[in-house]
Image (spheres, helix red, strand yellow):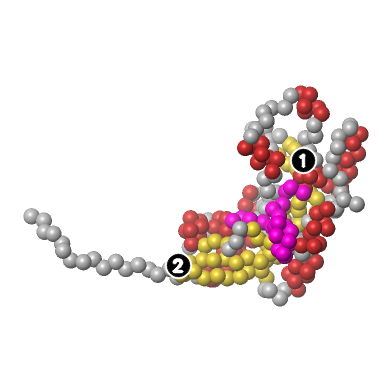
Amino acid sequence: MATKNTGEVEISVLEIATQKVDYCIIGQTPIILNRMTEKVKNELLLPKGRKTTAEKATSLKHDPLQEFFDSPYKLSDISAPTLLAHLATAFKKAIANTAIDIPGAKKAQMGRLMWVEGEKIPLYGIPKLHMSVTRSADMNKTPDVRSRCIIPKWAARLTVVFTVPLLKEPIVSNLLAAAGQIQGVGDWRPEKGSGTFGQFRLVKPDDKEFLKILKEGDRSAQEKAMKNPEAYDDETDELFEWFIIEAEKRGHKVTRRAK
C-alpha cells in the first residue's frame, strides 16, 4: 500500500541577473542596407493585382534614386547621432548563428540568453548609391537590377545584454568577434554564402579609425549625402546615368539628385 508523503520539498531557484557590455565595431567590408520599402509593405497589405500590358508600358519598373532613399532604416529623432541605422536584431541574429559553428555554444540557447539593447543601432559613415544585377527568388532566378544604400566605411556602438552566470563576457565577446567574420550584417553578407559585405571587427573606443568615421559620418554628413548621393562604383555610375537619360527620353518622370 502506497504511503502519502507529507514532507515538504525544498525548491532551489537559481538567481539570474544580467550584465551589459559595450562594444565598438568597424566595418571591414561595406554594408548594404535594404529594408522592405513602404511601397512593398502597402502592396502586401492591400494588393493592387496584376498590371495590364498598358500599365506596364506606361509605368516605371524602377526608380533607382527613390529605391536608394527607401532602402535604409532611418532614425526620425533629430537628436539621434546618425540618420541611418540597422536593426539590433540583425546583430543578435549574427551572434546566435555563429554559435552553430563554434563548439560549446548553441544557437537557440544564445538566442534566449543574450540580446542587443535597443531597437535600431545608429550607423556612422557616408552613404552612397549602389546598383547591381541580382537574381530574384523565383524558380527561374530572374535577373533584376537593385538600387540600394551602401556605406563603404562604417562604424557602430553596440550594447550586448546577457544573463549571468549562464553566460560570461569572454564567450559573448568571442561570439561577436566571430560573427563579424563569418556572419556579417546587411545584404550580401557571408551568412548567405556568396557575399562578403557587412563584415566587421571589434575595436577599442579610442581607435583612430573608429573615431574618424564617427566624426566624418555623423547625422549631418549623412543627411547631405542622402540628398545628393555619389555612385559607389563605375558600374553604378554608368547604369544610373543611362537610366536617367533613357527614362526621360521615353517621357517618364524620375527622381533626380538634389542640386
Mark 1, residues whose alpha carbon is within 10 Å: few (<14), some, or many (≥20)?
some
Residue 183 rendering spot, x and y as whole percentages: 62, 56
Q: Is residue 29 visible?
A: no
Residue 194 rendering spot, x and y as whole percentages: 67, 48
Of callouts 1 and 2, which one flags the residue occurring earlier in the amino acid sequence? 1
> Relative to residue 228, is residue 30 drawn left or right?
left
Reply yes or no: does residue 131 show up in magenta. no
> Relative to residue 107, is residue 1 drawn left or right?
left
Q: Which residue is mark 1?
A: 145
Q: Residue at x 69, y 53 (%)?
A: 73
* Residue at the outermost left position: 1
Q: Residue at x 73, y 36 (%)?
A: 143
- Picture quarter with the N terminus: bottom left
Q: Amino acid at mark 2?
A: Leu
Judged from the image, the secondary structure of the residue bearing numbered disc 2 is loop
Q: Which residue is mark 2?
A: 166
> Relative to residue 115, is residue 242 drawn left or right?
right
Q: Amino acid at mark 1?
A: Val
Q: Quadrant of residue 84?
A: bottom right
Q: Residue at x 23, y 66 (%)?
A: 9
* Above or below for 47 versus 258: above
Reply yes or no: does residue 84 show up in magenta. yes
Q: Residue at x 90, y 36 (%)?
A: 248
Residue 145 rendering spot, x and y as whole percentages: 77, 40
* Above or below for 51 versus 222: above
Residue 160 rendering spot, x and y as whole percentages: 57, 66
* Residue at the outermost bottom position: 206
What is the magenta range? Answer: 69-90
Q: Is residue 244 visible?
A: yes
